[in-house]
Image (tube, helix red, strand yellow):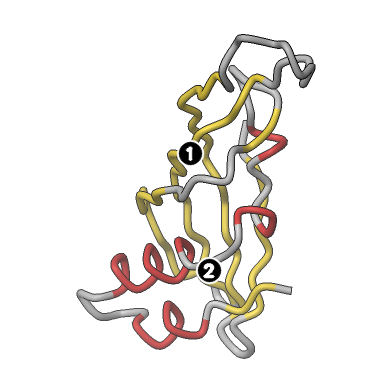
Amino acid sequence: MIHLQQALRAWGTPDFNDALKHELEQLPAEQLPLQQGLAHSSYVSGESFKVMVINATDAGPLLRCKVGVFYTGIIAGCSCADDPSPTDVQPEYCDLQLEIDKATATTAITLLP
């Protein structure tokens, strides 16, 4: 389960977007639905990703945020010892919706179409 404590503490301040961005970028990529968001490759690469906060609203007991994630994927070759093709890295992008519980900081993350 993901808990975005720093972002929750920063809600309502000018530092919110930076806190949310920083906290998300510290997560392992496996904790986000990046694999499901691939459009040009077959696997999420191990490289770091960047987050852009698009909007955030107060929805009663939740903070609802939309973020864009810039990351890279790879098109894996056949993995043969004599395969001359290097690993092909492709830029990827997806939008995610975050629902942060204001009482616990527990965060549900959904891939947006």
Q: Is residue 58 left or right of residue 28?
A: left
**Residue ID at (53%, 77%):** 4
Q: Which mark is residue 12?
A: none
Report x, y in % for residue 46: 58, 46
Q: Which mark is residue 71?
A: 1
Please state which amino acid type lies under the numbered disc 2: Ala
Q: Residue at x 51, y 34 (%)?
A: 72
Report whether 101 appears left or right of 24: right
Viewer-proximal residue, 102 or 67? 67
Relative to the observer, which residue lies in front, 58 or 86? 86
Pointer 2 residue: 59
Question: Residue 63 appears at what percent x and percent y?
Answer: 51, 70
Q: Hey, which quadrant is residue 113 in on the image?
A: top right
Q: Earlier in the sequence, mark 1 or mark 2?
A: 2
Q: Quadrant of residue 19?
A: bottom left
* Position of 38 relative to 69 (above/below): above
Residue 55 picture location, percent across and down: 37, 53
- Find numbered disc 2 in the image and state the secondary structure of the residue it sits on: strand
Residue at image point 70% right, 24% down: 42
Nearer mark to the viewer, of 1 and 2: 1
Quarter of the image containing the N terminus?
Answer: bottom right
Considering the numbered disc 1 on the image, is that residue within a helix, a strand or a loop?
Answer: strand
Q: Amino acid at mark 1?
A: Tyr
Residue 13: % across, % down: 25, 80
